[in-house]
Each structure stands twice: as C-alpha cells, then as structure tokens.
Image (cartoon, rainbow, N blue to C red):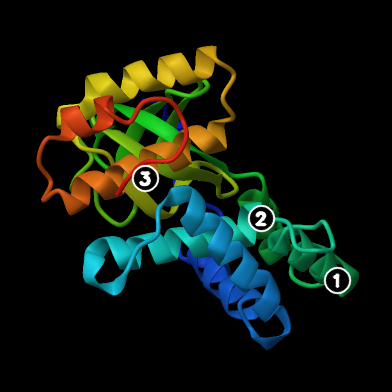
Amino acid sequence: MSESTTTAPRWDPGLIHALLDELAAVYAGAAYQREIAAAREEYFTRSGKVFEDDAEVYEARTLSFLEWYVIERPLVSGQTPILDALGKMEEESQSTRRSEALAGLASSHRSVFDIAGVDGNVIELEDVLGGARFCVVERRGTVGFEVGALVEARVVWDGEQPVFGKTFLFHPRDARTEILDFVDEAVAGDEHRDEIMFHLARLYLRWHRHGHSNAARIYKGGGTAGPVPL
C-alpha cells in the first residue's frame, strides 16, 4: 500500500458529510418541494419503494436518496443541486476549501464494487461496472468490509485521497455469483450503469422482505434490468 493512501487528508474528515447534510437541508426546503417530490418518486420507483416497517432499510434508502438527489439528479434548471450550490458559492467568492469539497462531491463516482482487500482502514475496491480500482480510506470503521463482498458505494476525492460517501448497500454474499453474472450480461448489453444499480437495489429489497433468505435464487430470478416484484 502506497504511503499516500494513508496520509491525513487536507480537509476536515467530516466536511464532505457535513456538506451533504447542508445540501439536503437546502434543496429539500420549501423552495424545492416540487423538485424533491418528483425526485423522490423517480428514485423509489427505480430502486423499489420502501416503508417505515422495512426497518433499517427505510433509513438507509432515505439517506441514499438524498445523496443521489443532491449530487446526481438535475433540477428543472438543468443543474444538479450540488452544481447549483457550487455556482452560487463561486459567485459569492466563498471559502475555497468548501468549494473544493463541493467540486470533489460533484465529480464523485457511484458504482458497485468488489472488495479486493482490507488493510487497516484502507479498502481496496474493484469497480465491477467499469473495471477501475481504488484504495479508499474509511474513517468510520471497517466492520462489514470483507474481501469478496459486493457493495454499492460512492467514492469521493477529498483533496488528497479517495474516501467514501455517506451510504453503502452491501449485497448478500450468497448471491455473489448471480450478481456478477447479471452485471456481465447487463454491461455486455449496454445497460446504463444507473439502471444496473437500481435493478440490484430492487433485488436487495426483495431479498430483505424474504427474511434475508434465498439470496442466490432471488438475484438469479431477477433477470435483466427492469421491474422486480417485491
């Protein structure tokens, strides 16, 4: 592991997550109610609708939605919330440190990753949708990060090293073969990476509602990207 992957970041370790919270608060506010309502309907239609009795999945999926909304979904203006905020910050000549952090978030990379190695708090990842490899620092702890696990996550450049966004979706290990087979088929068929991830998220929700059982059968039965009965 190179020395540069474990050096202290230039920014406050919590800055990226704090900015995500600030963006969510602003762009879910009264001025954006129609925007976020439309975004919510789109996201949960594509990833699978969740309800409060879905327990921990409800909270995790809500946080994932907010992260997706502020970083990836364009407003009616055509700009994503994060680019809109970055433009306003630059117009007002605000903190370079904060604008750099926003730019890092705006260029972040969300994908499904295969965990190839764990060395202290450094996680080695392979992007199964694109093939890139990353060594990512996880400051919150590495419980659950195991070699061979498949996880949907967001990688963000924090100024000196890659770190994770706020949310993760760990797919069941028992469905590893089925997931990789589906990804290979979908990529070969030129499915958009977003549709692949949303489809896998729907399969995860179906597996959750089946009591975390029959993972391989559920993921294998998911077929090609498209509707998944929950």
User: Residues under labels 2 and 1: Cα distance?
Assistant: 25 Å
- According to the picture, the residue beneath numbered tag 3 turns out to be 202
**In percent of the image, x 71 and y 64: which residue is there?**
81
Q: Amino acid at mark 2?
A: Arg
- According to the picture, the residue beneath numbered tag 2 turns out to be 73
In this rendering, the label closer to the viewer, 3 or 1: 3
In this rendering, the label closer to the viewer, 2 or 1: 2
In this rendering, the label closer to the viewer, 2 or 3: 3
Marks 2/1 in contact by CB < 8 Å: the verdict is: no
Residue neighbourhood size for the residue with mark 1, other residues' Cα within 10 Å, grouped as few (<14), some (14–19), many (≥20): few
Residue neighbourhood size for the residue with mark 2, other residues' Cα within 10 Å, grouped as few (<14), some (14–19), many (≥20): many
The answer to which of 97 and 130 lies nearer the viewer is: 130
N-term mark: 2 or 1: 2
Residue 23 is situated, as x and y percent measured from the top left of the image, at 62, 71
- According to the picture, the residue beneath numbered tag 1 turns out to be 93
| Relative to 207, residue 130 above or below | above
